[in-house]
Image (spheres, rainbow, N blue to C red):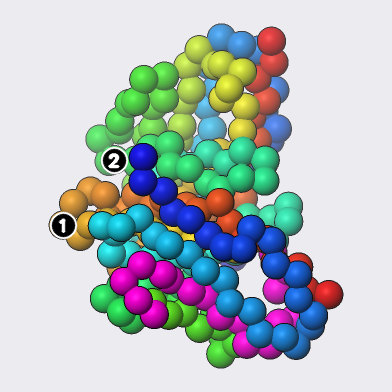
Amino acid sequence: EPEVTQTPSHQVTQMGQEVILRCVPISNHLYFYWYRQILGQKVEFLVSFYNNEISEKSEIFDDQFSVERPDGSNFTLKIRSTKLEDSAMYFCASSGPPGTSGVNEQFFGPGTRLTVL
Amino acid sequence: RKEVEQDPGPFNVPEGATVAFNCTYSNSASQSFFWYRQDCRKEPKLLMSVYSSGNEDGRFTAQLNRASQYISLLIRDSKLSDSATYLCVARYNFNKFYFGSGTKLNVKP
């Protein structure tokens, strides 16, 4: 069964450092998402991406965050200067293809746990 | 303001019981709704989409009431493996999704 993969599974970084979280969405999906979940809290939408551009973003997704699809398979989330409060589990998800009911049905990766010290 | 609200539970039920969860959403422009389950420290997994006419998938039934802005999930004949947190999700605009905080279910033998 196709699945979304994410690397690394755990990333530890110092405050102020840049991190890049990587995701490989399901191959025929065209919509991509990043979410975060602070320990014990709800899953929070960060951004959705379609056709090589951001389609929606939340208030959390400020100038410190950026997303990129550098090639045909990877989807990345960059945090430029990490803060303590960025510590969370970051989930990537994908859905699609367009024109089908599957466009709404998101499949999540296992997450990257980011710890900012 | 919480976009999607759920009773956090926990709901503690015996095996074989029927249990129902409700969820309310604040934005009447919400377009689509879903139930996900999340096991401890794992990723959310889609359980089912929620259609206006209501829909059923095996032991699971989902209902949507747009007038009252709530969604429900009914689980019949609960299994131990149903123990998880159930997340209510609403889609806004083109591709923006709001998750509720989840309702925790514990099914006991």
Range of magenta residues = A70-88
Q: Of helix, strand and loop, which one carries label 2?
A: loop
Q: Amino acid at mark 1?
A: Gly
How far apart marks 1 and 2 lie (CA) works out to 17 Å
The answer to whether residue B75 of the structure is visible from this angle is: yes
Given residues A78 and B80, the one toward you in this image is A78
Q: Which residue is mark 2?
A: B51
Q: In the displayed structure, does residue B52 sit left or right of residue A48?
A: left
Residue drawn at 75 percent across, 70 percent down: A12
The answer to whether residue B5 of the structure is visible from this angle is: no
From this viewpoint, which residue is outermost toward the right? A117
Q: Is residue B92 above or below residue B99?
A: below
Residue drawn at 75 percent across, 81 percent down: A83
Q: Which residue is mark 1?
A: A99
Q: Of helix, strand and loop, which one carries label 1?
A: loop
Residue drawn at 58 percent across, 77 percent down: A20
Residue drawn at 66 percent across, 85 percent down: A18
Q: Are marks 1 and 2 on the same chain?
A: no
Q: Which corner quadrant holds the N terminus of chain B?
A: bottom right
Whether residue B51 appears in magenta in the rendering, the answer is no
**Residue B55 x/y as whole percent:** 30, 30
**Residue B27 x/y as whole percent:** 42, 61
Q: Give me the chain letter of mark 1.
A: A
Q: Give me the chain letter of mark 2.
A: B
* Label 1 CA crowd tier, 10 Å (few <14, some 14–19, many 20+): few
Q: Is residue B45 above or below residue A55?
A: above
Q: Which corner quadrant holds the C terminus of chain B?
A: top right
Q: Is residue B21 above or below residue A29?
A: above
Q: In the displayed structure, does residue A29 sit left or right of residue B19?
A: left
**Residue A84 x/y as whole percent:** 79, 76
Q: Amino acid at mark 2?
A: Tyr
Q: How many marks?
A: 2
